[in-house]
Structure formats: C-alpha cells, structure tokens
Image (cartoon, rainbow, N blue to C red):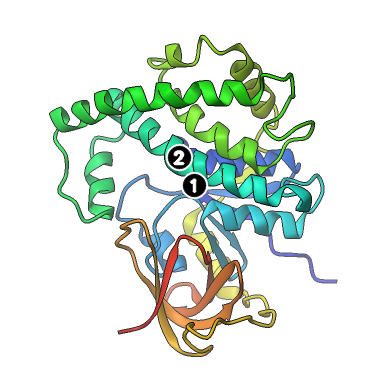
Amino acid sequence: MTAPPELILHHYDFSNFAEKVRLALGFKGLAWRGVTIPAVAPKPELTALTGGYRRTPVLQTGADIWCDTRLILRELERRHPAPALLPAALLTQIDALVYWAENRLMRPITLYASGMNGDVLPANLQADRSAMRGLPPPDEATMRRAALRNAPLVRAQIPAVEAMLADGRPWILGNAPTAADLAVYHPLWFLTARTQRLAFELEPFGRIAAWMARVRDFGHGDVEPMAAEQAIAIARAARPLPMPPSALHPEDPPLGSTVRIRADDNGQEVVSGELVFAGPDELALRREDPRAGTVVVHFPRLGYDLRPAR
C-alpha cells in the first residue's frame, strides 16, 4: 500500500492563522514538515505551488495545495477524523463562531497589536498588507491612530469570550475542544505573539487565561523543518488526488473551463487554472507550473470569488 502524502505546512512563526493550524496538528497528534516562508512578498516558492495565492498558512499534500485555514482544518479532519475538531452535531455553531472570531474579533486585534508592536514586527509588514488590499502603505502615525481607534473594539469583545466560559465549561462549545476554540484562540494569541506589551488586556480574565493554557497544551505535534525547494520537488514528483464528483450550481463555470479565483475581502492575488472540482464547500483548480509541475489548488467556496478567466 502506498503511504499517504506527508503533511507539509508553509508558515511563519507569528502568523496567527498558522498558529491555528499548528495547534490543530498538535491536537490530532500528527507529524508534519514545516516550510518557513517570508512574512511579506515576494514569496516565489509559495506562489510556485499556489499560482499566486500568498496568504499564510498553506497546507501541501503531494501535488495538492490547500488554501485557507477553514479548508485546511476540514482536510485534516477528513484524513484524521479522531480526535474530532469538527463534530457534525456542532458544525453550524462552529461556523458561526469561526466567522465572528476571524472577522469581527480578529481585525481590530490585528490593527491594535500591529500598531502598538510595530517595532517587533517586520518593518515592511504593514506596507505589504496594504498592497495586498490595493491600498497605499501607511506611515507610523497612521498605524498609531488605527491602533488607538481599534483598542476599544478589542476591549468590547474580550469579555464576550470570558462570558462563553462563565458556566464552567472547559471549552467554547462544551466539554470537548472544537475548531471554534482554535478560531477564538488565535486572535487573542496574536496580542502577545511577539511581545508581552499588550498582555494587560487579557489579565483581568481568569477563565480566558485558563482556557488559553488548555489550548496551548495541544502543542504543535511532531514537526520537522523542510526546505522550500524540497517541497516543490515533492509536488513535481506527485500526482494530484482524484477529484470526487462535482455538484455545480447553474451559475458556476463548467468543469474544464479556465477560471480565476480570489478572496472576496479586497484581496488582490488571483489564481487561474482549469476548474476540476466544484462542491458545496470547496473549489479546486488544476494548474501547470514550470517548477512545481501539475498541481491542484483547493479553496473554500465561501469567502472566494469564482469567475471565468478573462
């Protein structure tokens, strides 16, 4: 029997979304290889695999490339269903909490923490993130003003997390951890990812502190570093997974057509290729790369814009 492709995570240390996946790998007790990618563009080794998508993290299994942590966790769950992070009975609640945590909670935290901790982050990080959204680079005064505007929005929401745990439950949705715990955890983790300067924002909340300690105890699994060129060589030597039957909507481009996908939150990076799968929750494009060979890049359907190529 052929061994399944190893898990390769393309990530960097202070990415809060990467921390979400690292903790999922630890919770499931998995071994994986880690490719450290730049925090800012250019990312030529990553985009050789993704075709232009440059957000962090990206999961690679052979010649299949999984984008967005919502889809990455679903794929990990499919391959390694126990212990479960996405129990079927709680999927609706998990999806709602993930959306709140990774949009309403996370954005003010990242603006607050980045503006107050700019001296411990890469100097060109904010210029890079602005370029991703088609915006001019902010100066230090602009970042400081954004931090001060967003601090109250952070403080308005942290008590909600404390309240979720007020009945003594150990986890956000009850007696067992789920993906909701990881989604709520990683924005709070970002407050102190590089410095303890903003730790005071969490200090009054004892239930959050105990819960975050329980999440940290998942660890990161068994990780071994890998060079980017080795990951590209693995993709080139592999074949993408067979695609399951699609379930297209009448409005979808037909299978086999050339399409483009980009994130619908003002992201500028576009991935083009042949549409090889469209389901209720996932889209997949096959593309050819001179370095990586034939790869299939997978995206969640929600949060991404699918159109015929121009």
Q: Is 159 placed above or below 251 here?
A: above
Give the side of residue 206 with respect to residue 148, left or right. Answer: right
Which residue is at 75% across, 43% downward? 28
Q: Nearer the viewer, mark 2 or mark 1?
A: 2
Q: Which residue is mark 1?
A: 11
Closest to the observer, 149 or 135: 149
Local SS, label 2: loop
Neighbourhood count class around disc 2 (C-alpha, 10 Å): few under 14, some 14–19, many 20 upward: some
Give the side of residue 291 with respect to residue 59, left or right. Answer: left
Quarter occupied by the C terminus = bottom left
Q: Amino acid at mark 1?
A: His
Quarter occupied by the N terminus = bottom right
Q: Amino acid at mark 2?
A: Ser
Q: Which residue is mark 2?
A: 15
Q: Position of residue 245 (x, y in %)?
A: 68, 83
Q: Are marks 2 and 1 in contact (CB under 8 Å)?
A: yes
Which residue is at 48% across, 42% downward? 102
Which residue is at 65% across, 43% downward? 179
Which residue is at 65% across, 21% downward? 213
Local SS, label 1: strand
